[in-house]
């Protein structure tokens, strides 16, 4: 099993997590220090990604969940800024299509899992099925689920399916890290206002984000339940304070770098028997340089 970083932001595995106790802001270094630390972590991730790619046995899956305007996109961009695009796959999951709704709720994300040796990022994920769908259970009507709808049983079964799914992936070499970017209602309100007022940000403004804000308490209750039920030793959640963006990006990058380091991935060695062949090929190449 992977030795995931023990951090103050890791959601405990015993179901005791409380949103009300999870900070949305932490004191610490100033902005310049955070930016320097982010750069250092990005450099580590870049080097470790090469190892992951060369090793080609395991993959890393980073799942991001958050309320709107918490900074998922910019965090993903910042954290992966040093990574070779060929070794990395990012997918944003929006409202499901009719084809996606015609399958079980883990189908569409399964098709997008990272290949061995790659870093995969899910910008939203199957967790929407116990978050937005739990806040708006009327969405279930479009899912053509079999049998009677018994909401409490349905949610309990979905948490169980997620735990089992992630356990299966972990056994098969997918290292799963999950980040909840924990922004406060007040900071989200400020950011939504900025999207309205700043012409360069206006394209990000969605009227729906304002109407969804009215369900804040329900969302927080759903996050609390989901994180309690699905933070596990094989796929932990990290509740990252998101009111201060430079600090949030730094924390996410450092958790990813630390996790990758803990894998101790060696560069693959050439099999012994091919040493002679390689020596021969080296001689051939050197001879060509002389020609
Ligand atoms: P941004 O707003 O930063 O561009 P976003 O991730 O919020 O990024 P949107 O297109 O605004 O992207 O929103 C996607 C919407 O799709 C969210 O409101 C999310 O809750 C919803 N969604 C995602 N998965 C599901 C799902 N399985 N069922 C219902 N709604 C979903
Ligand atoms: Mg949105």
Image (cartoon, grey):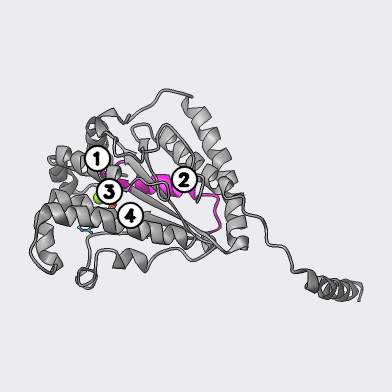
Q: CA distance from mark 2 to mark 3?
A: 18 Å
Name the N-terminal-most of marks 2 and 3.
Answer: 2
Q: CA distance from mark 4 to mark 3?
A: 33 Å
Q: CA distance from mark 4 to mark 1?
A: 16 Å
**Local SS, label 4:** helix
**Local SS, label 1:** helix
Name the N-terminal-most of marks 1 and 2.
Answer: 2
Left or right of 32 in this view: 190: left
Q: Is residue 281 above or below residue 80?
A: below
List x then y, in percent, for residue 280: 86, 75
Q: Name the residue nearer the viewer: 27 or 289.
A: 27
Query: Label 2: which residue?
Result: 78
Q: Nearer the viewer, mark 1 or mark 2?
A: 1
Query: Label 1: which residue?
Result: 224
* Structural crowding at the residue carrying mark 1, measured as other residues with C-alpha within 10 Å and reported as few (<14), some (14–19) or many (≥20): some
Residue 156 part of the magenta segment? no
Outermost residue on the front side: it is 14
Q: Nearer the viewer, mark 4 or mark 1?
A: 4
Q: Residue 204: which disc?
A: 3
Tell me where the magenta segment starts and ends, as one range.
Answer: 65-84
* Structural crowding at the residue carrying mark 3, measured as other residues with C-alpha within 10 Å and reported as few (<14), some (14–19) or many (≥20): few
């Amino acid at each position: 099993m992977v030795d995931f970083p023990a951090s103050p932001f890791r959601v405990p595995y015993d179901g005791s997590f409380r949103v009300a106790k999870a900070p949305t802001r932490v004191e610490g270094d100033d902005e310049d220090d955070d930016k320097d630390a982010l750069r250092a972590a990005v450099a580590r991730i870049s080097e470790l990604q090469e190892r992951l790619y060369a090793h080609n046995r395991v993959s890393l899956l980073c799942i991001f969940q958050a309320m709107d305007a918490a900074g998922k996109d910019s965090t993903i961009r910042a954290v992966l800024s040093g990574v070779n695009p060929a070794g990395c796959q990012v997918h944003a999951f929006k409202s499901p299509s009719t084809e996606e709704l015609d399958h079980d709720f883990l189908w569409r994300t399964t098709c997008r899992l990272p290949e061995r040796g790659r870093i995969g990022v899910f910008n939203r994920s199957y967790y929407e099925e116990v978050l937005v769908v739990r806040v708006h259970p009327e969405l279930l009507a479009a899912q053509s689920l079999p049998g009677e709808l018994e909401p409490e049983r349905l949610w309990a079964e979905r948490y169980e399916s997620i735990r089992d799914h992630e356990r299966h992936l972990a056994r098969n070499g997918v290292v799963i890290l999950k980040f909840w970017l924990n922004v406060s209602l007040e900071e989200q309100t400020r950011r939504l206002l900025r999207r309205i007022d700043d012409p360069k940000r206006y394209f990000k403004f969605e009227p729906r984000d304002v109407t969804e804000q009215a369900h804040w308490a329900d969302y927080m209750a759903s996050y609390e339940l989901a994180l309690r039920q699905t933070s596990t030793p094989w796929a932990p959640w990290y509740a990252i304070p998101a009111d201060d963006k430079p600090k949030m990006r730094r924390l996410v990058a450092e958790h990813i770098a630390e996790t990758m380091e803990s894998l101790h991935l060696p560069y693959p060695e050439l099999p012994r028997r091919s040493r002679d062949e390689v020596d021969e090929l080296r001689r051939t190449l050197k001879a060509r340089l002389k020609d």
